Image (cartoon, coloured by chain):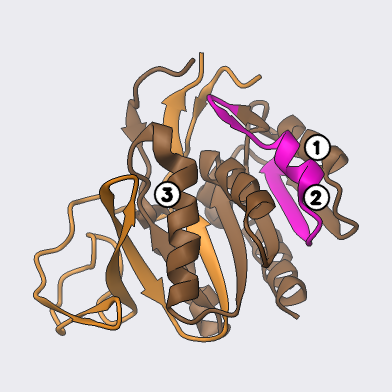
Chain colours: A brown, B orange
């Protein structure tokens, strides 16, 4: 059972990161979640929208809860060629990442900071459960969470891991 | 089972805001801003992304698309809630 939302993130979490992906040749969609109960529907709708706009291959990514939702959606959608998460919990409210990664066969990357609460252990759990033959785990020093990993002491390692993953998934 | 608050620092310093009051025109499902100097949604540099809305569960979600190309990345943000 989850309590009502206290303070939400927004698409702005990705505003300083998405342009670099676009400069690398990707079409990047960021969006705001609606209600807490509809996050999976929202991610599905966003994935559908980017296909309508002409994308041939889709990679899903997310931070924290968004990472878990990205993994869940990747397992449900057809033709998602990869998924990655930053600090995704394995279970969070009514979102569950473990069943998703057990189904998802495309490349997958899990990133978390060692001292960010339970999230590093969650990333290890997701990695161990992942059925993909092409799965990667990056645990970095520090306590940064989600998109803040791009601003922490291990930012370059995170950036390189995600960029390499995207290139591989897209190929 | 996660029992802590889930969320984190926003890498942009801008607080999330309602959509910027830019005028817009729709082209093939995408909405292009018309050269306003305001940050899109309070955080996206003008001219770097196209604004659009996504319908989901009866709600219009704010969204933006950066770049072009056949390979797309859909990015989901943090959402801070307490899982009890």
Q: Quadrant of the C terminus of chain A?
A: bottom right
Locate residue A108 relative to residue A72 in the image: left or right: right
Q: Which residue is mark 1?
A: A124
Q: Residue at x 76, y 56 (%)?
A: A108
Cα separation, mark 3 vs mark 2, equals 26 Å
The segment highlighted magenta reads A92-113
Cα separation, mark 2 vs mark 1, equals 7 Å
Tell which subunit mark 2 falls on. A
Vertical position of residue A62 compared to residue A142: above or below = below
Q: Residue at x 13, y 79 (%)?
A: B36
Q: Which residue is mark 3?
A: A42
- Which mark lies nearer to you, 1 or 3? 3
Q: Position of residue B23 (x, y in %)?
A: 9, 75
Vertical position of residue A105 compared to residue B48: above or below = above
2 and 1 marks in contact (CB < 8 Å): yes
Query: Can you tell which mark lies on residue A137?
Result: 2
Vertical position of residue B14 compared to residue B34: above or below = above
- Which mark lies nearer to you, 3 or 2? 3
Question: Is residue A110 at all visible to an observer of this figure?
Answer: yes
1 and 3 marks in contact (CB < 8 Å): no
Pick whichever, B53 or B13, lies toward us.
B53
Secondary structure of the residue carrying tag 1 is: helix
């Amino acid at each position: 059972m989850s309590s009502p939302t206290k303070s939400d993130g927004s698409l702005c979490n990705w505003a300083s990161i998405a342009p670099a992906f676009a400069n690398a040749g990707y079409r990047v969609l960021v969006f705001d979640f609606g209600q807490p109960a509809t996050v999976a529907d929202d991610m599905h709708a966003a994935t559908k929208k980017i296909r309508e706009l002409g994308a041939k291959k889709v990679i899903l990514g997310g931070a924290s809860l968004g990472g878990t939702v990205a993994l869940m959606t990747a397992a449900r959608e057809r033709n998602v060629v990869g998924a990655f998460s930053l600090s995704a919990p394995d279970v969070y409210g009514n979102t569950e990442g473990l069943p998703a990664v057990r189904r998802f066969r495309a490349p997958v990357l899990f990133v978390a900071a060692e001292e960010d609460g339970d999230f590093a252990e969650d990333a290890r759990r997701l990695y161990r459960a992942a059925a993909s033959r092409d799965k990667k785990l990056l645990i970095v020093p520090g306590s940064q969470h989600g998109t803040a990993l791009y601003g922490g002491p291990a930012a370059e390692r995170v950036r390189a891991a995600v960029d390499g993953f995207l290139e591989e998934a897209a190929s | 089972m996660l029992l802590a608050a889930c969320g984190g620092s926003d890498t942009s310093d801008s607080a999330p805001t309602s959509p910027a009051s830019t005028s817009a025109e729709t082209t093939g499902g995408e909405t292009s801003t018309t050269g306003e100097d305001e940050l899109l949604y309070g955080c996206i540099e003008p001219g770097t992304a196209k604004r659009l809305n996504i319908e989901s569960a009866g709600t219009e979600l704010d969204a933006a698309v950066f770049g072009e190309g056949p390979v797309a990345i859909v990015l989901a943000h943090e959402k801070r809630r307490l899982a009890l």
